[in-house]
Amino acid sequence: QVQLVESGGGLVQAGGSLRLSCAASGLTFSSYMMGWFRQAPGKEREFVAAISWGGGNTAYADSVKGRFTISRANRENTLYLQMNSLKLEDTAVYYCAAVRSLSPSLAYTHNEYDYWGQGTQVTVSS
């Protein structure tokens, strides 16, 4: 069965950096569009970034544009999210998600994705 396992979360001071990873198994990773979402306490899950199957097309939420970078290593079945210049408002549980797609178009809403990881907590302190 498909499994997505996030790692790399933790506690970091504002202005710091973290790199999240998402290890995928049970699927042909290179045939899947991948995304990162996050959910803060009391808020709805929100889109963070997405990347096409081959990595040639990416998209970001305005709130993270210029600070976060999504990437993937298809040979290693792994998705990444490099997060720099972290802000207090970046505190949330971060989820990776997958949907089978060989289209260059990207998905921005959570209901477009079929598989989800369990999430990893990112806490940014002042």
Image (spheres, rainbow, N blue to C red):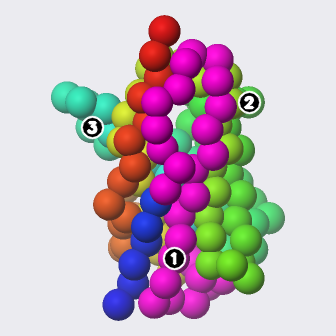
Per the image, the residue denoted by label 1 is 24
From where the camera sits, is residue 8 visible? yes
- First in sequence: mark 3 or mark 2? 3
Residue 118 x %, y % = 32, 60
Check the image and report above or below for 61 versus 102.
above
Camera-nearest label, 2 or 1: 1
Residue 23 x %, y % = 53, 71
Which residue sits at x=57%, y=37%? 61
Per the image, the residue denoted by label 3 is 44
Per the image, the residue denoted by label 2 is 66
Instruction: Specify the farthest residue to the left.
Output: 42
Please tell me whether residue 47 belongs to the stretch shown in magenta: no
> Which element carries disc 1, helix, strand or loop?
strand
Q: Quadrant of residue 89?
A: top left
Instruction: Specify the farthest residue to the top.
Output: 126
Q: Nearer the viewer, residue 107 or 122?
A: 122
Could you give the CA–CA distance between mark 2 and mark 1, rounded to whole angstroms? 26 Å
Which residue sits at x=57%, y=78%? 32
> Which element carries disc 3, helix, strand or loop?
loop
From where the camera sits, is residue 96 visible? no
Residue 108 x %, y % = 49, 52
Q: Amino acid at mark 3?
A: Glu
- First in sequence: mark 2 or mark 1? 1
Could you give the CA–CA distance between mark 3 and mark 2, rounded to whole angstroms? 23 Å
